Image (cartoon, coloured by chain):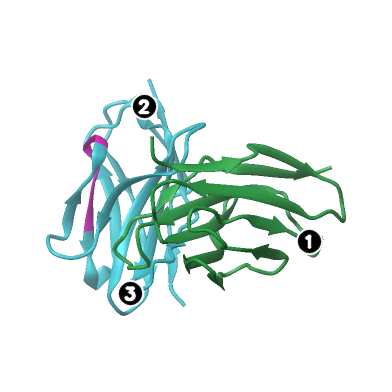
Amino acid sequence: DGGITQSPKYLFRKEGQNVTLSCEQNLNHDAMYWYRQDPGQGLRLIYYSQIVNDFQKGDIAEGYSVSREKKESFPLTVTSAQKNPTAFYLCASSITVSGNQPQHFGDGTRLSIL
Amino acid sequence: AQSVSQHNHHVILSEAASLELGCNYSYGGTVNLFWYVQYPGQHLQLLLKYFSGDPLVKGIKGFEAEFIKSKFSFNLRKPSVQWSDTAEYFCAVNTGTASKLTFGTGTRLQVTL
């Protein structure tokens, strides 16, 4: 089945550590996205990538980094600079960057600080 | 910058009641509008979308939404809800050419038997 796989489902981090969240898609989509979901705040865009080796900051990029070395993969690193990393992280993809293409979402990774 | 407002944060309905969830956006240009649903324990999935044409769009599971350009609104409706419609509903918008979405804060719908 085609889809988006996020791993791990749950992740715990100690203060001062960087952690990397995985996102893989086998939909052959060009565009990929990372969102953060907090209670009562909906989804906020962290980073997005329109094509391999290219990515842009979203609305809340501070404390995060990404890479897009392969079309199917868009890992997100939560760095120690992110002051409030506890959240639910969602990865998404769309066929192209065109605005009328709906996004498909993964099951998410819940990150907690120990 | 565009923004999306969902004024109903938590809605509780009995089965068979009618549903209308409000969504307003702020952007003066061409927009694409979406409603997504997140059932408990499941991933976010597309309910319906509007790009152009007939402003009344129909989606999955009996949902529909009406785009009213003059009111900058895209309200979600269902004539008769079921217990299985219990979920969180998100309205989202992007501009005509850019795919990155701006989401509303979501509405949690609880349907009681």
Q: Are marks 3 and 1 on the same chain?
A: no
Please give the letter of the chain rendered in cyan: B
- The structure residue drawn at horizontal position 80% and vertical position 65%, both measured from the top left corner, is A81
Q: Nearer the viewer, mark 1 or mark 2?
A: 1
Is A41 or A16 nearer to us in this picture?
A16
- Give me the C-alpha separation between circle 1 and circle 2: 37 Å
| Pointer 1 chain | A
Query: What residue would you read off at disc 3?
Result: B97
Query: What residue would you read off at disc 2?
Result: B84
Query: What residue would you read off at disc 1?
Result: A83
Residue at the extreme front: A70
The secondary element bearing badge 3 is classed as loop
The secondary element bearing badge 2 is classed as helix
Tag shown at residue A47: none
Q: Residues within 10 Å of mark 1 (few under 14, many from 20)?
A: few
Magenta highlight range: B61-66
